[in-house]
Image: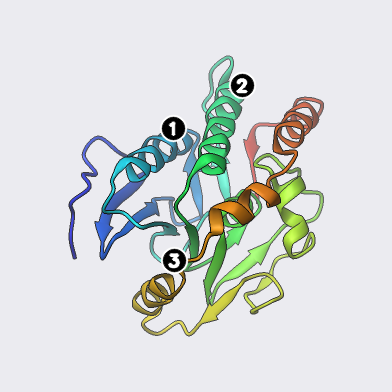
Amino acid sequence: MSSNITTYGFHDISFWKEENIGLIVIRCDSKGRSRQSLFKELLQVVGIAYMDESVRSIAITGINEIFLKEIMLEEKQGAAHEFFDYAHALIRTIYSLNKPIFSVINGPAVGIGNEIALLGDAIIASSAAVLGFQPEYNFTLLGSLTASRFGVRPVEQAKQGLNADYVLERDNFMDDAKKKIHDLDTLRYNLNRKIRFRGFEEAMLLEKDNYFSMPHGSIKG
């Protein structure tokens, strides 16, 4: 395992380079919750991976067989506005990337976790993973646009073609996922991404307006 890309200074993610893959690990708690500062750190490391010429692709995964279920907003004035500022900057950065992005789902990817997964060019899921949206979930991370890929689906077991592009066995999942990434990383995903994200600026604003029209305190799965 290589650690050419430093993780110093990050708290909500781990980040390193492994076999030309910029590997981003979301560090949520045992209930699948992370802090809103996750998006500031994601924005930083995606930018680092973009600039590193030795990184051919980017992979986002979770820790301890959990991907992400919920973002806990800070208890301060303007916290939600700050969240959307970083989330939208992240989406714009992903839109502009010329490297493929893979969502490597090692556990529950629910609600906003599933929205992050859908931002990737291909979803590679463990057979033990679940993905989807809970009833009455409100999109906050472009899910109103990207969910059209598989349809707005409830939380259910990962199944190839239903809610994931590839499903691999749980045993040896991460090693097998890296092999799959190497098989796919020469495809021109960036062109397809621009087509998939067409109209994303309007979708982001509509989601933000919808969020602020309703009671809120966190962004849940």
Residue on which disc 2 sits: 81
Secondary structure under tag 1 reads helix
The answer to whether residue 127 of the structure is visible from this angle is no
Amino acid identity at mark 2: His
Residue 2 image position (x, y, % from top left): 18, 60
Q: Quadrant of residue 50?
A: top left
Amino acid identity at mark 1: Lys
Q: Which residue is rendered at x = 64% and y = 79% of the image?
A: 160
Q: Which residue is rendered at x = 30% and y = 50% of the image?
A: 15
- Specify whether 41 is left or right of 219: left
Which mark lies nearer to you, 3 or 2? 3
Instruction: Tell me which colouring the rendered structure shows.
Output: rainbow
Residue on which disc 1 sits: 40
Secondary structure under tag 2 reads helix
Q: CA distance from mark 1 to mark 2?
A: 13 Å
Residue 105 image position (x, y, % from top left): 51, 66
User: In this orientation, which residue lies closer to the viewer: 94 or 144?
Assistant: 94
Label 2 crowd bin: few (<14), some (14–19), many (20+), radius 10 Å: few
Q: Which mark is residue 186?
A: 3
Which mark lies nearer to you, 3 or 1? 3
Q: CA distance from mark 3 to mark 1?
A: 28 Å
Q: Which mark is residue 156?
A: none
Amino acid identity at mark 3: Thr
Q: CA distance from mark 3 to mark 2?
A: 37 Å
Q: Which residue is rendered at x = 51% and y = 37% of the image?
A: 93
Q: Which residue is rendered at x = 74% and y = 28% of the image?
A: 205
Label 3 crowd bin: few (<14), some (14–19), many (20+), radius 10 Å: few
